[in-house]
Image (cartoon, rainbow, N blue to C red):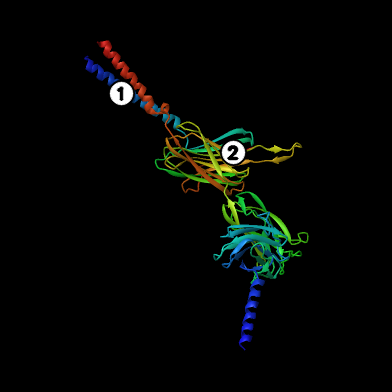
């Protein structure tokens, strides 16, 4: 094998390795992002001013090849809290999140004075469809 | 005959002279000159020198009739507040004592010099009232009535409600109190009024009191609370449920949006957490909507945060470019109180870039090739 051929061989080898790296990276990315179209999440936390707080979220992954409008309706204790419609493109996620105080507060005599939230209901709609794409209810004791 | 005519002319001249000396110089006009009893009005009295020169030491007094709201110069939001503004008069000062307003001034002989007196939130029972105005020229003169005295006609009210006392400037969402007075035809408080009053406002998001039926304990006056929430000029109206002509309103209430300041994480990178701390001048207990907008304008996240000390939200930008953050503040009833926006530029963190991952590979291969070259030699 001449030096020239050796160099060509090494160069080709490197190109193949680079391509492999790209392919592996692509596969792992796809594996990690291979998620559901709608994902709900709940996280409890504590705030010095508000006491116990809860973060409720829903993440939308548009699996279609075209952009869609998603509407997230939130009801807190059966009262409409928000109704947000956003356009979600095929390659970018959208997250709706709601952080609310959930701590019951009592007087020294154990009388309940603050009972902020009992339930949160999230419903996701796509485009003009009246049929919900997904929904969830979080309850607080 | 000749001598008689001369004497007559001389007498006429003397009389004319005496007439001129008997009255003060200048004119005083008032606007409005016709109002309804029982309703607070703002009046402007305008003094004009009528091209007379008023030497240093000149003075004008205007006496407010005793049945009118007493003038005062201490509380600018109070009833009967008086302030004086010069019109081309080089020096002036004023004071209020009892029912009399005294203005010390001087003017040259140019036309239309003088001053205006603003007399605010004043009312009186029905009738025709003369605001006696006197002037004197220089230190040595004496105060004399001007020829035409400003007059205000107060017409009887056919039963009205007077709404007043809500802060003329307020922050959206802040609670404010106001008074409803039932006024009879003579402009007096109708102590026996027992009508049921309903409230409306130009602010569709306003929190207004429930209908109130006046009772004998009210004695024609009742104080209420309300929240105005929409920025702009608003009014509150009270109307008798049974007789809609018995009505009244407070107008020109300036509702201001809360003020916001954003503090952002400096020099944010793609993938790093960016924190936006928003301070608001509003009262606590509200909620804030954060919208994080990608450079293409699409919303990456909507988040509602209940206020603690400040409103705080964090987000990890997933692409580079200029991001926007729009915030909207809502009260606990869902009324939007204010809005604000800010932006930041997210730059690529090289260690996360694909190029960053491939470049070392090429560097290694380059070294390897050189090594092989030397090895083969």
> To which quarter of the image does residue A34 belong?
top left
Assess disc 2: are there few (<14), some (14-19) or many (≥20) residues with their C-alpha within 10 Å of its C-alpha: some
* Residue located beneath label 2 in the image: B310
Q: Position of residue A100 (x, y in %)?
A: 60, 39
Quarter of the image holding residue B122? bottom right
Above or below B231: residue B150: below
Residue B158: image x %, image y %? 68, 70
Single out the mark in the foreground, 1 or 2.
Answer: 2
Q: Give the labeled residue for mark 1.
A: A15
Q: Secondary structure at mark 2?
A: loop
The disc placed on residue A128 is none
What is the chain letter for disc 1? Answer: A
Residue for point 57% across, 56% down = B233
Q: Chain of mark 2?
A: B
Quick one: label 1, few (<14), some, or many (20+) residues within 10 Å?
A: some
* Image quarter hosting the C terminus of chain B: top left
- Badge 1 vs badge 2, beta-carbon distance below 8 Å: no
Q: Could you say where residue A58 lies in the image, as x and y percent from the top left? A: 52, 38
Depth order, front residue of B96/B3: B3
Residue B131 visible in this rendered orientation of the protein: no
From the viewer's side, name the closer residue of B299 and B83. B83
Q: CA distance from mark 1 to mark 2?
A: 54 Å
- The residue at the point 55 percent across, 43 percent down is B260
Q: Is residue B278 visible?
A: yes
Farthest residue, direction front: B3
At mark 1, the secondary structure is: helix
Q: Looking at this view, is B154 or A130 the one in front?
A: B154
- Number of numbered discs visible in the structure rendering: 2
The image quadrant where one finds the N terminus of chain B is bottom right
């Amino acid at each position: 094998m001449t030096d020239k051929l050796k160099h060509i061989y090494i160069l080709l080898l490197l190109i193949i390795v680079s391509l492999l790296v790209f392919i592996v990276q692509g596969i792992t990315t796809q594996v990690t992002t291979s998620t559901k179209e709608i994902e709900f999440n709940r996280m409890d936390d504590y705030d010095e001013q508000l006491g116990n707080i809860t973060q409720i979220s829903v993440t939308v992954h548009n699996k279609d090849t075209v952009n869609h409008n998603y509407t997230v309706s939130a009801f807190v204790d059966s009262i409409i809290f928000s109704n947000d419609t956003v356009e979600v493109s095929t390659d970018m996620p959208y997250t709706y999140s709601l952080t609310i105080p959930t701590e019951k507060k009592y007087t020294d005599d154990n009388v309940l004075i603050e009972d902020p939230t009992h339930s949160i209901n999230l419903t996701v709609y796509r485009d003009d469809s009246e049929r919900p794409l997904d929904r969830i209810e979080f309850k607080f004791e | 005959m000749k001598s008689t005519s001369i004497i007559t002319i001389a007498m006429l001249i003397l009389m004319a002279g005496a007439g001129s000396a008997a009255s003060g110089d200048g004119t005083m006009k008032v606007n409005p000159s016709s109002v309804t009893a029982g309703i607070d009005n703002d009046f402007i009295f305008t003094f004009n020198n009528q091209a007379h020169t008023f030497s240093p030491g000149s003075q004008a007094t205007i006496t407010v009739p005793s049945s009118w709201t007493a003038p005062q110069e201490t509380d600018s939001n109070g009833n009967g507040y008086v302030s004086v503004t010069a019109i081309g008069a080089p020096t002036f000062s004023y004071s209020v004592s009892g029912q009399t307003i005294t203005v010390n001034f001087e003017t040259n002989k140019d036309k239309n010099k003088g001053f205006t007196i603003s007399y605010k939130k004043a009312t009186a029972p029905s009738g025709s009232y003369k605001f006696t105005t006197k002037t004197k020229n220089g230190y040595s003169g004496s105060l004399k009535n001007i020829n035409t005295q400003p007059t205000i006609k107060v017409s009887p009210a056919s039963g009205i409600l007077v709404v007043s006392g809500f802060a003329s400037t307020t922050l959206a969402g802040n609670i404010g109190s106001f008074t409803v007075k039932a006024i009879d035809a003579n402009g007096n408080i109708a102590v026996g009024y027992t009508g049921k009053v309903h409230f409306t406002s130009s602010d569709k998001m306003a929190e207004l009191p429930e209908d109130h039926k006046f009772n004998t304990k009210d004695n024609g006056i009742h104080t209420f609370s309300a929240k105005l929430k929409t920025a702009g000029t608003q009014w509150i109206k009270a109307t008798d449920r049974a007789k809609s002509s018995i009505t009244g309103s407070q107008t020109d209430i300036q509702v201001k949006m809360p003020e916001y300041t954003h503090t952002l994480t400096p020099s944010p990178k793609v993938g790093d957490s960016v924190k936006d701390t928003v301070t608001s001048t509003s009262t606590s207990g509200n909620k804030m909507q954060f919208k994080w907008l990608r450079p293409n304008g699409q919303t990456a996240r909507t988040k509602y945060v209940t206020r603690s000390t400040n409103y705080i939200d964090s987000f990890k930008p997933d692409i580079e470019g200029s991001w926007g953050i729009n915030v909207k503040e809502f009260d606990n009833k869902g009324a939007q109180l204010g809005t604000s926006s800010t932006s930041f530029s997210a730059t690529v963190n090289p260690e996360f870039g694909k190029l960053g991952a491939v470049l070392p590979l090429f560097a290694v291969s380059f070294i390897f090739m050189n090594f092989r070259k030397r090895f083969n030699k």
